[in-house]
Image (tube, rainbow, N blue to C red):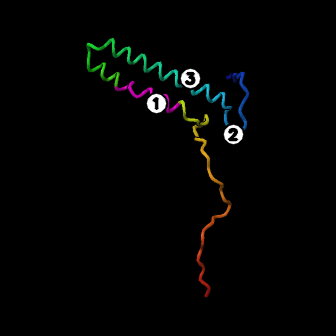
Amino acid sequence: MWRRRHRDEPVLITDAAPSFDAEQRHRKRVYAVLMAVHLVGFTAAGLLAHIWWLALGIVVVTGALPWVAVVIANDRTSERGQRRLYRGEKRAIEDQHHDQIDS
């Protein structure tokens, strides 16, 4: 029989956003991983400088990672990937003028 594994974390039953601290920790981890990949790539490109086309390819692939890491680290999104932007007040009824012709 299949047994369900119980997690130590409680099940999230609301649609509340994660806390600011949890979200910031996640963004810091993503930034650190991307920068580590960038440093490893540039180190590998330096070591493979005698194969110029391979080194150039590695530099091109990992060259944009610092910019991507900064953009991701500064982007506040929820875990579901929905951006939390300010949206103006939503009206229940459309505020449009409709012409009527009486006969």
Q: Earlier in the sequence, mark 2 or mark 3?
A: 2
Q: Which structural element holds mark 1?
A: helix
**Residue in the foreground of this view, choosing between 1 and 67:** 67
The residue that mark 3 highlights is 29
Q: Is residue 6 visible?
A: no
Q: Which residue appears farthest toward the bottom when viewing the image?
A: 103
- Residue type marked 2: Asp
Looking at the image, residue 44 lies above or below residue 9: above
Please give the name of the residue rendered at 52% of the width and 25% of the height, measured from the top-left corner.
Answer: 31
- The Cα–Cα distance between marks 2 and 3, rounded to whole angstroms, is 23 Å
The x and y percentages for residue 3 are 69, 22
> In the rendered image, which residue does mark 1 sit on?
68
Q: Is residue 22 left or right of residue 50?
A: right
**Helix, strand or loop at disc 3?**
helix
Report the side of 43 relative to 82 (left or right): left
From mark 3 to mark 1, how far is it between C-alphas? 14 Å
Residue 83 is drawn in which quadrant?
top right
- Provide the residue designation for mark 2: 15
Q: Nearer the viewer, mark 1 or mark 2?
A: 1
| Residue 22 in the image, given as x and y percentages of width and height | 65, 27
Q: Which residue type carries mark 3? A: Arg
Residue drawn at 59 percent across, 83 percent down = 101
Indicate whether 86 appears above or below 70: below
The residue type indicated by label 1 comes to: Val
> Is the Cβ of the residue at disc 1 closer than 8 Å to that at disc 2?
no
